[in-house]
Amino acid sequence: MYPGAFKNFKSAKLPLKVGIRADILAAMPDVEPKLIEAALREYCYRSDYQRYLTEGAGRVNLQGEVVGTVSAEEARHAAACMKGKKVVT
C-alpha cells in the first residue's frame, strides 16, 4: 500500500519516520489499531530493518520522502538489539 516506505522482504529497509504509527492510523481508520501496531512491530524489530538504522540515515514518511534522520542514540540502540542486548536509555 505504501511502497515508498515499506519495502519487500528482499530489499533494503528504509528507516521509518518517528511517529509513523499515527500517520498510518490516520490514513487507515478502518483498520484495527492493534493490527497496525503488530505489523509495525514485526517489520521494525526484524534484523534486516535494524541493520539500516545507522546514524544519519534518512527516515521516510509513507510516501517515501526523507523527513528526518536516525540519531546516534537510535543507531546504538539498533546495534545493541541486533547483538541481543537490552539497551537502557
Image: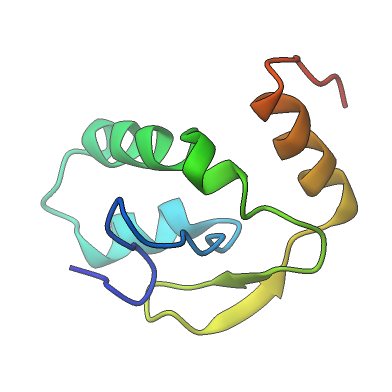
Residue displayed at 71% across by 68% down: 57
* Residue 86 locus on image (x, y percent): 75, 15
Residue displayed at 87% across by 45% down: 73
**How many numbered marks does the figure carry?**
0
Where, by quadrant of the figure, is residue 43 drawn?
A: top left
Image quarter (top left, top right, bottom left or bottom right) of the C terminus? top right
Residue displayed at 55% across by 56% down: 19
Above or below for 8 versus 32:
below
* Residue 84 locus on image (x, y percent): 68, 16
Describe residue 53's horizontal placement relative to residue 22 as left or right: right
* Residue 75 locus on image (x, y percent): 78, 47
Comparing 33 with 13, the one in front is 13
Display colour scheme: rainbow
Where, by quadrant of the figure, is residue 17 drawn?
A: bottom right
Where, by quadrant of the figure, is residue 62 drawn?
A: bottom left
Comparing 21 with 2, the one in front is 2
Describe residue 89's horizontal placement relative to residue 42 as left or right: right
Above or below for 71 versus 34:
below
Comparing 60 with 10, the one in front is 10
